[in-house]
């Protein structure tokens, strides 16, 4: 998604929150969730840092969620 600056609220695992509850499989990084870091303002030059740091966090969280789904489908089979 583009042009969604400050669009979603996330937690420390970068999970997107819906009605105050974290999603099990939707994670965000970059300026879409920058309001969680920047508040109501924007500091020039931090977009790449936010994208890099939270991209790594979101990627790790998404991989963990995918592994959990995969493990649960093996158990169910």
Image (cartoon, grey):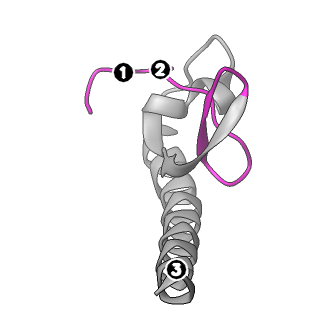
- Spot occupied by residue 8 in the image (x, y as percentages of width and height): 53, 25
Q: Earlier in the sequence, mark 1 or mark 3?
A: 1
Q: CA distance from mark 3 to mark 2?
A: 27 Å
Badge 3: few (under 14), some or many (20 or more) residues near its Cα, within 10 Å?
few
Q: Check disc 1 and report the residue beneath it.
A: 4
| Dot 3 or dot 2, earlier in sequence | 2
Is residue 13 magenta-colored?
yes
Q: Nearer the viewer, residue 29 or 43?
A: 29
x and y percent of residue 10 in the render? 64, 37
Report helix, strand or loop for mark 3: helix
- Label 2 crowding class (10 Å Cα cut-off): few <14, some 14-19, many 20+? some
Q: Which residue is mark 2?
A: 7
**Secondary structure that dominates the magenta span:** loop
Q: Is residue 18 left or right of residue 51?
A: right
Q: Are marks 1 and 3 in contact (CB under 8 Å)?
A: no
Q: Residue at x 46, y 49 (%)?
A: 51
Point out the frontmost of discs 1 and 3.
Answer: 3
- Asked if the residues shown at circle 3 and circle 2 are in contact, with their CB atoms under 8 angstroms apart, the answer is no
Look at the image and give the residue range highlighted in magenta.
Answer: 1-20
Residue found 71% across the figure and 33% down from its top: 21
Identify which residue, 18 or 70, lies in the foreground. 70
Q: What whole-number distance in Å separates the C-alpha atoms at marks 1 and 2?
A: 5 Å
- Residue 9 x %, y %: 62, 28
The residue wearing badge 3 is 67
Q: Nearer the viewer, residue 63 or 28?
A: 63
Q: Secondary structure at mark 2?
A: loop
Secondary structure beneath disc 1? loop
Quadrant, the N terminus: top left
Image location (x, y in percent) of residue 27: 50, 48
From mark 1 to mark 3, how far is it between C-alphas?
29 Å
Residue contact at pointers 1 and 2, CB within 8 angstroms: yes
- Residue at the far top: name it: 40
């Amino acid at each position: 998604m583009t042009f969604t600056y400050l669009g979603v609220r996330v937690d420390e695992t970068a999970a997107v929150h819906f009605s105050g509850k974290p999603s099990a499989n939707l994670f965000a990084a970059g300026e879409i969730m920058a309001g969680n870091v920047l508040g109501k303002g924007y500091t020039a030059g931090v977009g790449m840092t936010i994208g890099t740091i939270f991209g790594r966090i979101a990627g790790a969280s998404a991989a963990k969620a995918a592994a959990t789904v995969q493990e649960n489908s093996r158990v169910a089979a």
